[in-house]
């Protein structure tokens, strides 16, 4: 059975991805953690962290929870600041 085509994210989804990415970057820098180190902490590579921060790829819920734990904050902080 063929896979259905993936829908492109709309403007709102792209904006939300960038906002979450901005919060990830802010918390990471605030704590003095490199993209590489954050990747090690959550089991991802530096490039994946970069994609999350720039809103190029949406982070999975598991990765968001792992990042929040690494930062010592509640997961909702990644969504609402």
Image: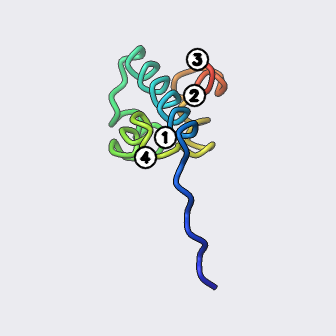
Q: Are marks 1 and 4 in contact (CB under 8 Å)?
A: yes
Q: Earlier in the sequence, mark 3 or mark 1?
A: 1
Q: Which residue is mark 4?
A: 44
Distance of label 4 from label 3 (alpha carbons): 23 Å
What residue is shown at x 54% (from left), y 48% (from top)? 9
Q: Kindly identify which residue carries mark 2.
A: 68
Q: CA distance from mark 3 to mark 1?
A: 20 Å
At horizontal 45% and vertical 25% (from top left) the residue drawn is: 22
Residue 65 percent location from the top left of the image: 61, 35
Give the quarter of the figure containing the N terminus: bottom right
Identity of the residue furthest to the top in this view: 30
Is label 1 in a helix, a strand or a loop?
Answer: helix
- Sooner in the amino-acid sequence: mark 4 or mark 2: 4
Residue 81 bears which disc, if any? 3
61 sits left or right of 8 in the view? right
What's the CA distance linking mark 1 and mark 4? Answer: 6 Å
* Residue 32 x, y percent position in the rendering: 36, 18
Mark in front: 4 vs 3: 3
Decide: few, some or many residues near mark 2? Use Cα within 10 Å; few <14, some 14-19, many ≥20. Answer: some
Query: Mark 4: which secondary structure?
Result: loop
Pick the front one: 72 or 63: 63
Query: Secondary structure under badge 2?
Result: helix
Q: CA distance from mark 2 to mark 3?
A: 12 Å
Left or right side of 5 for 51:
left
Dot 3 alpha-carbon crowd within 10 angstroms: few under 14, some 14 to 19, many 20 or more: few
Residue at the outermost bottom position: 1
> Label 1 to label 2, Cα distance in Å?
10 Å
- Residue annotated with mark 1: 42
């Amino acid at each position: 059975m063929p896979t259905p085509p993936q829908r492109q994210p709309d403007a709102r989804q792209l904006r939300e991805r960038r906002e979450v990415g901005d919060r990830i970057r802010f918390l990471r820098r605030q704590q003095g953690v490199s993209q590489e180190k954050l990747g090690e902490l959550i089991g991802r590579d530096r490039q994946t962290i970069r994609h999350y921060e720039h809103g190029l790829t949406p982070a999975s819920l598991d990765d968001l929870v792992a990042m929040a734990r690494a930062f010592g904050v509640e997961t909702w902080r990644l969504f609402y600041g």
